[in-house]
Amino acid sequence: MQQKFFLQYLSLAPVLAVVSVSVAFTTWAVFNYFLPDLLFHPMP
């Protein structure tokens, strides 16, 4: 019974929004770590 309520909680919109935003920001941060933007790290 606990598993059913937990899966129902994970399908709520705020939980999905927080998870998707955190995944998107983590992807962006890792991408910028390996390929830094020229705006913040200009060419010499």
Image (tube, helix red, strand yellow):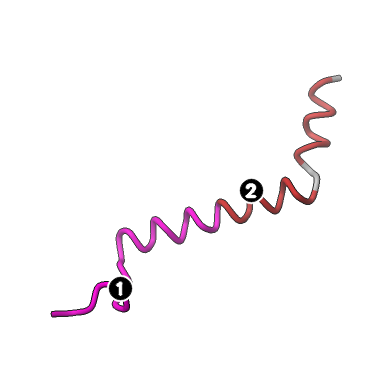
Relative side of 17 to 37, left or right: right
Query: Can residue 29 be found in the magenta stretch?
Result: yes
Magenta residues, as a range? 23-44
Tell me the SS state at disc 2: helix
The N terminus lies in quadrant: top right
Rendered image quadrant of residue 37: bottom left
Q: Nearer the viewer, residue 9 or 4?
A: 9
Q: Residue beneath label 1, please?
A: 40
Query: Do residues under tags 1 and 2 come within 8 Å of each other at their CB atoms?
Result: no
Mark closer to the chain start, 1 or 2: 2
Looking at the image, which is closer to me, 39 or 24?
39
Question: Label 1's element?
Answer: loop
In this figure, which residue is indicated by the disc labeled 2?
Answer: 19
Task: Residue type at mark 2: give it.
Answer: Val
Q: Mark 1, mark 2: which one is toward the viewer?
A: 1
Residue farthest to the top?
A: 1
Identity of the residue drawn at 84% across and 27% down? 4
Name the residue at 72% across, 45% down: 15
Tell me the tag on residue 31: none
Is 38 included in the stretch rendered in magenta?
yes
Q: Position of residue 32 (x, y in %)?
A: 36, 63
Q: Amino acid at mark 1?
A: Phe
Pinpoint residue 8: horizontal percent, then vertical percent: 83, 36
Residue beneath the point at 63% across and 48% down: 19
The single residue placed furthest to the front in the displayed view is 40
Q: Marks 1 and 2, Cα distance to the nearest angstrom? A: 27 Å
Task: Please tell me whether residue 18 is drawn above or below residue 7 in the rendered image.
Answer: below
Circle 1: is it few (<14), some (14-19), or many (20+) Cα within 10 Å?
A: few
Q: Residues within 10 Å of mark 2 (few under 14, many from 20)?
A: few
Query: Which picture quadrant has residue 3?
Result: top right
